[in-house]
Image (tube, helix red, strand yellow):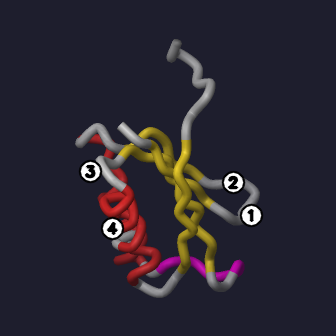
Amino acid sequence: MPQYIYFIYRHDPDSMPNEEAGEAHWNGLQQALRDGKLLMAGRPQDGASPAIVVFEADSDEEAQRFADEEPFVTSGFARVELHPFRAALMRGVK
């Protein structure tokens, strides 16, 4: 299945998402993990941007929809930049 990565860039580096957007973001990623779509998500621990989400989708259109529906985007907190991706090396995977 094709892999994708999106980068999450805050509009204001000093801002924090509202509680509703943060909860929706976390819950959406948890659901994608349960659905077997999410490969990895995280952010730099020094507060730098961007955060990343690596996931699988059946098509470019599905990947774009997933990125467009990111709660940090729909709430106006951040923008995402989507790219096709391929994990070339990953611990535990041959």
Note whether 30 is above or below 83 in the view shown.
Answer: above
Whole-number angstrom distance, CA of label 1 to CA of label 4: 26 Å
User: Quadrant location of the N terminus?
Assistant: top left
Q: Residue at x 54, y 71 (%)?
A: 80
Q: Are marks 1 and 2 in contact (CB under 8 Å)?
A: yes
Is 24 or 67 nearer to us in this picture? Answer: 67
**Badge 1 local density, few (<14 within 10 Å), some, or many (20+)?**
few
Provide the residue designation for mark 1: 48
Tell me the SS state at disc 4. helix
Q: Looking at this rendering, what residue extends furthest in the front direction?
A: 60
**Where does label 3 land, which residue?**
31
Read off the magenta span: 13-17
- The tag earlier along the polypeptide, 3 or 2, is 3
Residue occupying the point 38% across, 58% down: 60
Find residue 15 and report its image quarter.
bottom right
Q: Amino acid at mark 1?
A: Ala
Q: Where residue 7 sits: x, y (%)?
A: 59, 62
Residue identifier under label 4: 65
Residue at which label 2 appears: 44
User: Are discs 2 and 4 less than 8 Å apart at CB?
Assistant: no
